Amino acid sequence: MEEGWKRADLHVHTTCSFDVLPVRDLHPESLYEKALKLGMDYITFTDHDTIEAYEILGWNREKLIPGVEMSVYDPEFAGHSLHINIFEFDREEFFELREIAEIEHDLKSFIKYLRRHKLPFIYNHPFWFEFHREPNPSAVPRLAKFFPVLEYNMHELKQKNELTIALAEKFGKGIVATTDTHSGRLGKVYTLSQGDNFREFFRNIEKGKNYIVPKNLTRELLIDEMNTWIDLIFEKSQKSSDIKNYLTGIKSLDTMVKISRSTLLNYSPKLNKTAMNLFYMISNTGLPASFYIHSEKSFAKEIEKNIEIESQK
């Protein structure tokens, strides 16, 4: 660090994302202060398709870099939705990009705009696919060619992250390690690069002149993450009325939210505590985590076979 290396976690969600619990610990102000205390040299919040965090914090805070995670569904060229992190844009550029993503559904036009405006951008979790869309893993290598940097994501299995590393090496792309946290655990993994400003920092990543400090999704990490969510749902969100309308799209989490918000539990702290302890007990058995890890490993094997078959054509 004394030689000028800078540290950043380039994928962090706040309460401004639809799938983050509306609790104080996850508010942009709280996470900004946490990032400062952790010694992050560049701080960015990449909420889903919104810049609300920057409207709350202001755009010129110390070390704060404008960021957003944008979803682009291009049924013709890509065949599925991609999540793309973009940095150092202004309001006008954000709304123009959102128009391309939501109205034109044109990935090539979207990327052309990013390049024309010289905006740093990342292909997030390349082998992750939205639950309600048909996965199209064979398209990922072709799509990766359009991106300067690929993401090594803490919430993906080692097998998937290794496939991402292999793509980055094959096509000469940069790689970053991110938490993609929705529960306030920023900085658990990070990227090291040099640069007196964010553009230089990111340019060195594009050139591969950086280091990553990564982790992969494991049974133990997933149990810990589940327990964090239980704490957030049953303890820290008790005074929040907004949680009644909160939905992640993940059935297990949404079920916990509905149970925690039931009238009976709200009027009985003892019953609420009992329900919370029951969920902790289930989580700590490791069974839900093991089931998820097993299904993800099977899917990772299918992806690898799919890519091998595609490369042989």
Image (cartoon, rainbow, N blue to C red):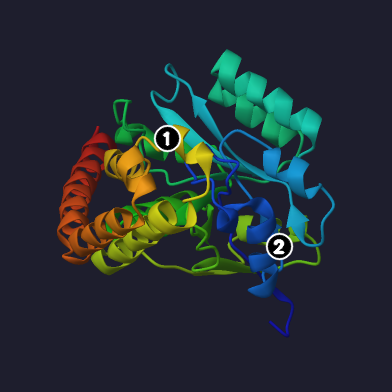
The quadrant of the image that shows the C terminus is top left
Question: Pointer 2: residues within 10 angstroms few (<14), some, or many (20+)?
Answer: some
Which one is in front, 247 or 167?
247
Residue 175 sits above or below residue 128 on the image:
below
Residue 91 sits above or below residue 149 on the image:
above
The quadrant of the image that shows the N terminus is bottom right
Residue 198 image position (x, y, % from top left): 75, 58
In three-dimensional space, the C-alpha distance between marks 1 and 2, rounded to whole angstroms, equals 31 Å
Measuring 54% from the left and 51% from the top, which residue is drawn there? Answer: 23
Q: Is residue 262 left or right of residue 289?
A: right
Q: Residue furthest bottom?
A: 2
Q: Which residue is mark 2?
A: 42
Q: Which residue is mark 1?
A: 142
Query: Is residue 173 visible from the viewing direction of this image?
Result: yes
Residue 81 image position (x, y, % from top left): 44, 29
Question: Pointer 1: residues within 10 angstroms few (<14), some, or many (20+)?
Answer: few
Q: Please, what is the three-letter code of the amino acid marked with disc 2?
A: Tyr
Residue 88 sits above or below residue 278 on the image:
above
Query: Is residue 180 visible from the viewing direction of this image?
Result: no
Q: Secondary structure at mark 2?
A: loop
Residue 107 image position (x, y, % from top left): 55, 25
Q: Please, what is the three-letter code of the amino acid marked with disc 1?
A: Arg
Q: Secondary structure at mark 1?
A: helix
Residue 211 image position (x, y, % from top left): 55, 70
Which one is in front, 292 or 270?
270
Measuring 64% from the left and 50% from the top, which residue is drawn there? Answer: 45
Depth check, mark 1 against mark 2: the one in front is 2
| Residue 4 badge | none
Q: Earlier in the sequence, mark 1 or mark 2?
A: 2
Measuring 14% from the left and 59% from the top, which residue is drawn there? Answer: 287
